[in-house]
Image: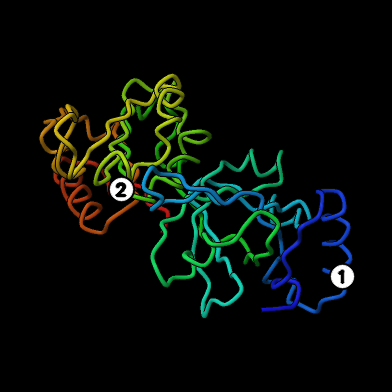
Amino acid sequence: MSPLSRLRLRLPAPLRRRALTGLAAAVQQDTDTWSQAPLSLVAPASADASLFHVAVDVSYAPDLAVSYTAPGQYLQLRVPGADKPAFLAIASPPSFAASRCEFQFLVKRVPGSTVDLLCGLRRGDIVELSGIMGRGFQVEEISPPDAFPSVFIFATGSGISPIRSLIELGVRANERSDVRLYYGARNLQKMAYQERFKDWEYAGVNVIPVLSQPDERWSGERGYVQTAFLRARHILNPSTTGAVLCGHKQMTEVITAKLVAEGVSKDKILTNF
């Protein structure tokens, strides 16, 4: 980790930007691979603080900002003191990165991990970002919307991160007749983006939270995402149905097997890896 990466900037924004620019020019680094940038937000994203919102100011890496073009793309992030980088899917849509020069992430805090160190940092701390990786969700496979009116989206835990980008930019739910998001978590205290559900519903996404260990007050879906989907007994037209999956391996395997058995083409079942 370079000296700039270890620096904690505690300056007003204009002075911080000038300092960052001058220091970045003085530090030798592999600019083809890594970009250095300050954190603009680190805050809990769930009631139990197991998930965190992290945002990075990429205004001094404009080429990196514009290279993010598809929901589901990801990158590596390095922090001081970590042995290895973390792979993080970008939660904010590409249009947000282009207009605000900021990448937003949703991360799961695991004790002793690189992400744990990241969640302990503060606004102004410097991290390093790799180039954008992956092709993202190949939404063209389930386009145009009138040809694929049914799209089922499945996410568990922090897997909702790139799904947010998809919903807010790429899925065009308001042009389809049946778009459903099955989002699984242990309980509401571990579920992120609840404040966005109304906006997603307004945009045409039927949000179906699924809780595996809810309290007695919960009246919604219980169990796991895959069991909730199988219970629903959907009547599918496989030639006009698409799906998007991000989360636990068992969930993606069960859902994929069910959809393929129903006749949905595997190339219409999208993942970002």
Spatial distance from mark 2 to mark 1, Cα to Cα? Answer: 41 Å
Q: Position of residue 180 (x, y in %)?
A: 31, 30
Within the image, what quadrant is residue 122 found in? Answer: bottom right
First in sequence, mark 2 or 1: give its number. 1
In the rendered structure, the answer to whether residue 141 lies left or right of residue 42 reads left
Colour scheme shown? rainbow
Percent x, y of residue 121: 59, 61
- Tell me the crowding category of disc 2: few under 14, some 14 to 19, or many 20 or more residues within 10 angstroms, Cα based: many
Q: For the point 52% across and 80% down, which residue is it?
A: 83
Quadrant that contains the C terminus: bottom left
Residue 85's spot in the image, x, y percent?
53, 72
Do the numbered discs 2 and 1 sit on residues whose CB atoms are within 8 Å?
A: no
119 lies above or below 191: below
Decide which of 172, 103 is in the foreground and name it.
103
- For the N terminus, the image quarter is bottom right
Q: Is residue 111 left or right of residue 32?
A: left
Residue at figure coordinates x 15%, y 37% from the top left: 222
Q: Secondary structure at mark 1?
A: helix
Amino acid type indicated by mark 2: Thr
Q: Quadrant of residue 78?
A: bottom right
Foreground pick, 150 / 250 = 250
Instruction: Name the residue type under label 1.
Output: Ala
Helix, strand or loop under label 2:
strand
Q: Which residue is mark 1?
A: 25
Q: Left or right? Give the position of 77 relative to 173.
A: right
Circle number at residue 187 = none
Q: Residue at x 63, y 64 (%)?
A: 131
User: In the image, what residue occupies the spot 27% across and 31% down?
Assistant: 208
How packed mark 1 is, by other alpha carbons closer than 10 Å (few <14, some 14-19, many 20 or more), is few
Q: Position of residue 211 (x, y in %)?
A: 21, 40
Q: Does 162 sit above or below residue 63?
A: above
Q: Which mark is residue 156?
A: 2
